[in-house]
Amino acid sequence: MSVNSGRAPQLTNVGPGVSFYRIEPPEGFPNCDTQAAATFRVFEDGVPPSPLQAIPQPECSDLLLSLANTLTRASYHFRRFSWLTDVLDERRRSIGGVVAGDLLARFALFEATGMLAAAKGFVEEVLFIAARRSGESASAGDRWSLDGAVKENLVATPACKYNVGEVQLLQGRRDWYERVNGYRNVLIHRGWKETPGAGYFPRDARVREASLPDINLYLVPDPSSIPRPHRATAWTYADGLRLDDLLQEAWIGLEAYAEELRTLWGLSVPPPGTVPVAEQPNVLVCEVFPAMICVHGYSYAPIFSNERSAMTFRDSCYGADSGREVVAIRSRAGPAGPWLIHFPAGEVLRNPPTLATCDVVKIALDPVFNPHTASLAYTVELATVSLSILRAHQGWFTPVNLISSRLVDQEELFIIRASTTGP
């Protein structure tokens, strides 16, 4: 099965040695990036705002980037849960009648687990940042207790270490945090009441099966019945709580807490990008170029039909311990089109000392190098390319088409990768 749903990669931009592509995600894969997460990724002028300057800049950047990723992880699981809920409802309606079980329902439960765990992780990361911001060492910050911070009476003990802005904001959302943490602990540590074959019922279902937790996986046990050591046999369901409502409340509260932290830390919300999502690159490709060598006044770019030949050439030409990589390439101009080999161009080739006297590069298939005579032998020349044209090229690299009957049945070719310091 193709993960790309038949949509070809679209080249969106190029840079020094890299290409950026857009490949549409598979159906059901959510767009989980948010402006709230972007807030924690960017400092204006690369300098943390004053409320965060007690933390060394590289550490501060790493901590906030991790926080942004954790928030994005929560967003992913929440949106994936919502999508699965819609899928379950559509499956139920497509059949009609009382659908008392659906084996896909358990996957929504897995996403709920991931979302609640990410929300708890976000709060834990914030507590460490609070400790570092207040002057604690990293080892001391690791010893700050989230449970202690939530329960500390800040009014009665104003001088305690937990009397900082991050904890004050969290205590203002104590009910939200305790609900997230309580159900997260159940799902992570004590399991769930999941009867094989249980399914999904919408909130407006009026059939008796919808009220049975053994059948309706979206029923949530009462908060009063889940604290340790209670497990599924001791849970009650009198409050009529639902899993989709729990996740919605958890996400809304997490976004609100993140917004409060943005204000506390003096972070700015970056403006939304102007490029539509459907045109934004999501794949970065490091372009690999074939190594070029100059032999008796001629320049060559060896291309190989199999890995063994490439490795033999590399070892005889450069030495087995040269560190040169043999890389497989699969780039074609269309499904049945010619092979595309990228060559460096422009600034990359302004002063290549080993090729200074060799203007024409011959692209040879499966050449053999003789280290004793420093000579190169081959039978098939795939193409030639002018170094002076490459040097004059305005881009960072340029593709060269390789057309040969010898390549028709090739599924991949191999090159010896050019070093980072020269051809």
Image (cartoon, rainbow, N blue to C red):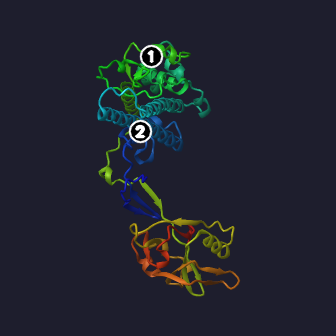
Q: Which residue lies furthest to the right in this view?
A: 372
Q: Quadrant of residue 270?
A: top left
Q: What residue type is labelled 2?
A: Tyr
* Image point (44%, 47%), residue name: 46
* Image point (41%, 15%), residue name: 237
Decide: few, some or many residues near mark 1? Use Cα within 10 Å; few <14, some 14-19, many ≥20: some
Visible residue check, residue 423: no
* Image point (67%, 72%), residue name: 315
Q: Is mark 1 on a helix, strand or loop?
A: helix
Identify whether 282 is placed above or below 312: above
Rendered image: mark on residue 341:
none
Identify whether 81 is placed above or below 296: above
Distance of mark 1 from mark 2, alpha carbons? 25 Å
Identify whether 85 is placed above or below 191: below
Instruction: Give the residue at mark 2.
Output: 76
**Is 100 situated left or right of 363 in this image?**
left
Residue 64, horizontal then vertical, whole percent: 47, 39
Visible residue check, residue 349: yes
Q: 137 or 14: nearer the eye?
A: 14
> Looking at the figure, which quarter contains the C terminus?
bottom right
Q: What residue type is labelled 1?
A: Pro
Residue 194, horizontal then vertical, whole percent: 47, 25
Q: 269 or 20: nearer the eye?
A: 20
* Image point (28%, 22%), residue name: 204
Q: 344 or 39: nearer the eye?
A: 344
Instruction: Give the residue at mark 1.
Output: 223
